[in-house]
Image (cartoon, helix red, strand yellow):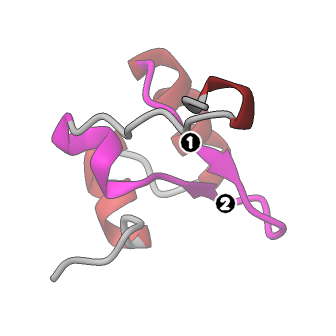
Amino acid sequence: MSAVFLESSEIAELTGRKIKSKQIETLRKMGLPFWINASGKPVVTRSAIEGKKELPRKKEWDLPE
């Protein structure tokens, strides 16, 4: 089973950048969803690059009675 998030080395390979600010810039240009963690590094979910879509969460008011 693979990890939920890409490793730092995988993000560097994906973006072609080693510097975190350049990785962020490249991820934005690529249109990939990501978060920036507390240390300023981009965090990318594996599903974001594998093309898997997360199922939408049902809201309480959407549930059948």
Percent x, y for residue 23?
A: 52, 43
Q: Amino acid at mark 2?
A: Lys
Residue appearing at x 47%, y 52% in the figure? 44
Residue situated furthest right in the rendering: 38
Percent x, y for residue 32?
A: 43, 29
Q: Quadrant of residue 21?
A: top right
Q: Which residue is mark 1?
A: 34
Residue situated furthest front in the rendering: 65
Which one is in front, 15 or 7?
Answer: 7
| Residue 19 lies in the magenta-colored region | no
Residue situated furthest bottom in the rendering: 1
Percent x, y for residue 42?
A: 60, 53
Q: Few, some or many C-alpha atoms within 10 Å of disc 1 (few <14, some 14-19, many ≥20)?
A: some
Which one is in front, 62 or 1?
Answer: 62
Q: Quadrant of residue 64?
A: top right
In this view, 64 is above or below 20: above
In the figure, is residue 53 to the left or right of 57? left
**Sequence-wise first label, 2 or 1:** 1
In the figure, is residue 23 to the left or right of 5? right
Q: Few, some or many C-alpha atoms within 10 Å of disc 2 (few <14, some 14-19, many ≥20)?
A: some
| Residue 34 lies in the magenta-colored region | yes
Q: Magenta segment, which residues?
A: 31-51
Count of numbered marks:
2
Q: Which mark is residue 41?
A: 2
In this view, 31 is above or below 16: above
Residue appearing at x 61%, y 31% in the figure? 65
Q: Which element is circle 1 on?
A: loop
In the figure, is residue 30 to the left or right of 21? left
Q: Amino acid at mark 1?
A: Phe
Q: Quadrant of residue 8?
A: bottom left
